[in-house]
Amino acid sequence: MSIKEKEQELFREWKEQQGYPYFISDGLMDESEWNQQKCKILFVLKEANWEGANADLCEFLLSEKSSEYWKTWNNIARWTKAVLEGGDYQKSVSKADKSYWIRKIAAMNLKKVGGDSVAEDDTIRSYAQRDKSYLKRQITLYEPDIIICCGRGEGKNADILHDIVFDLDEVSEWKEPILQYNYFLLSLGKKKNIPVVSFYHPQMRGSHTLFEKRFEEMKCIAATLRERYM
């Protein structure tokens, strides 16, 4: 059974067992591309901005029919490039550029029921607590080499993974930050020392000057972690 087939099986069970009237699927963008990557990247976000809808985030993003969420996914495309290839910051990201890079990743939300434009931290934490066994199963499907948690400040996604989703024997203590970015190490079955990094949300406010700074920081994080663990 392919990873995508296992994903869909998990999502069906998740929606049914948890009694969710709506469910937003996410995860592996393109299994063929994913399998070719030497460094498999999983991005973890909070929730999709779709209320009261069943949807497939991957299909939506790869359809290229809409430029909606351009800032979020353009920055994720840039950060993917920073990890996999490095090089220079790409100011202009076309729909085709976005699809080229995000086909190489997996991306998931902690809350599978859509929300509005501003995620409520207490709500996200509550859903993560309720769904932690399913979240853990989803992450385990991918066996990523690095997990990038998008969102800092109160209620960080990385904190939720560390404190709620995974057991104490699966996570390390927080490591000394790289630049200002905290991270811990996760063990999933035979796969040890998977770095889980607390990074900014890609929808952050700012100009290309700031976006380029984050791109360069991601390059530095990736290079440091590659040297230490990957």
Image (cartoon, rainbow, N blue to C red):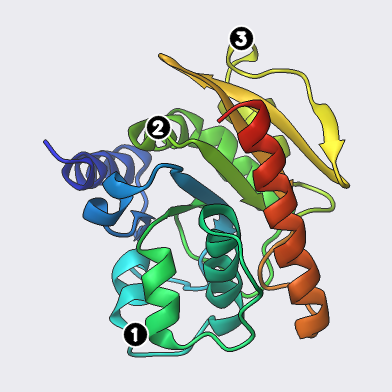
The numbered mark at residue 64 is 1
Earlier in the chain: of badge 3 and badge 1, it is 1
| Residue 108 image point, x, y percent | 46, 52
Earlier in the chain: of badge 3 and badge 2, it is 2
Q: To which residue does mark 3 refer?
A: 169
Q: Is residue 151 visible?
A: no
Outermost residue, front side: 87
Q: To which residue does mark 2 refer?
A: 143
| Residue 5 image point, x, y percent | 16, 44
Of 185 and 118, nearer the camera is 185
Q: Secondary structure at mark 2?
A: loop
Q: CA distance from mark 3 to mark 1?
A: 41 Å
Residue type pointed to by label 3: Asp
Q: Quadrant of residue 147?
A: top right
Are there few (<14), some (14-19), or many (20+) residues within 10 Å of tag 3? few
Of 197 and 218, nearer the camera is 218
